[in-house]
């Protein structure tokens, strides 16, 4: 069994995520008025559309109370709006504001810059291959979640 951390899949994937996140934070401090966690919220809302707070907490892999605090700050900053779900008045759904939509483009460009740094020296074909392989890994693990 391989014991070197740099050869362990889970460690390597987590470490690449940690390092790319740290680099994103470094660049974001200089150019965005959003944290990485807030950018993730906006990215999920952009991808999934309006979602309820429980679903967003699940996507972020945080406790609902932690998500609520993050969303409180974002709502105060004018990044998101909470509104009652017309189908279920007990539930509140989230949506991005126009301000957030404009900033999301900047956040995406920042993410692209981090990707370019991370994949410096990779050919276009190698980049495509890596992305394809990671998508396959994700698909394998998504299927493993089901009983």
Image: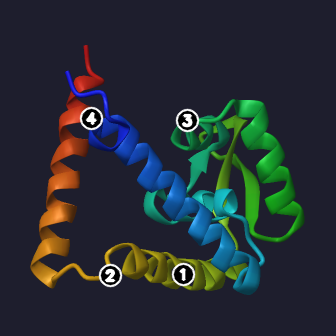
Residue drawn 26% across and 21% down? 146
Q: Position of residue 12 (x, y in %)?
A: 36, 45
Color encoding of the figure: rainbow
Q: CA distance from mark 4 to mark 3?
A: 14 Å
Q: Position of residue 62 (x, y in %)?
A: 64, 35
- Residue topped by disc 2: 120
Foreground: 96 or 67? 67
| For marks 2 and 4 on the same chain, the one whose residue lies earlier in the sequence | 2
Residue drawn 66% across and 56% down? 37
| For marks 3 and 1 on the same chain, the one whose residue lies earlier in the sequence | 3
Q: CA distance from mark 4 to mark 1?
A: 27 Å
Nearest to viewer (mark 3 / mark 1): 1
| For marks 3 and 2 on the same chain, the one whose residue lies earlier in the sequence | 3
Q: Position of residue 56 (x, y in %)?
A: 59, 44
- Residue topped by disc 3: 58
- Residue topped by disc 1: 110
| For marks 4 and 3 on the same chain, the one whose residue lies earlier in the sequence | 3
Density class for disc 4 (Cα within 10 Å; few <14, some 14-19, many ≥20) is: few
- Residue topped by disc 4: 142
């Amino acid at each position: 069994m391989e014991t070197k951390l740099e050869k362990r899949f889970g460690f390597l994937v987590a470490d690449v995520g940690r390092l790319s996140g740290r680099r994103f934070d470094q660049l974001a401090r200089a150019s965005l008025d959003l944290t990485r966690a807030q950018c993730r919220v906006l990215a999920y809302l952009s991808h999934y559309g309006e979602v309820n707070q429980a679903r967003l907490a699940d996507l972020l892999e945080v406790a609902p109370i932690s998500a609520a605090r993050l969303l409180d700050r974002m709502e105060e900053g004018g990044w998101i709006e909470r509104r009652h779900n017309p189908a279920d008045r007990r539930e509140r759904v989230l949506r991005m504001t126009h301000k957030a939509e404009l900033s999301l483009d900047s956040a995406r460009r920042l993410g692209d810059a981090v990707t370019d740094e991370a994949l410096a020296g990779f050919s276009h074909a190698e980049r495509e291959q890596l992305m394809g392989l990671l998508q396959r890994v994700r698909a394998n693990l998504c299927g493993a979640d089901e009983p």
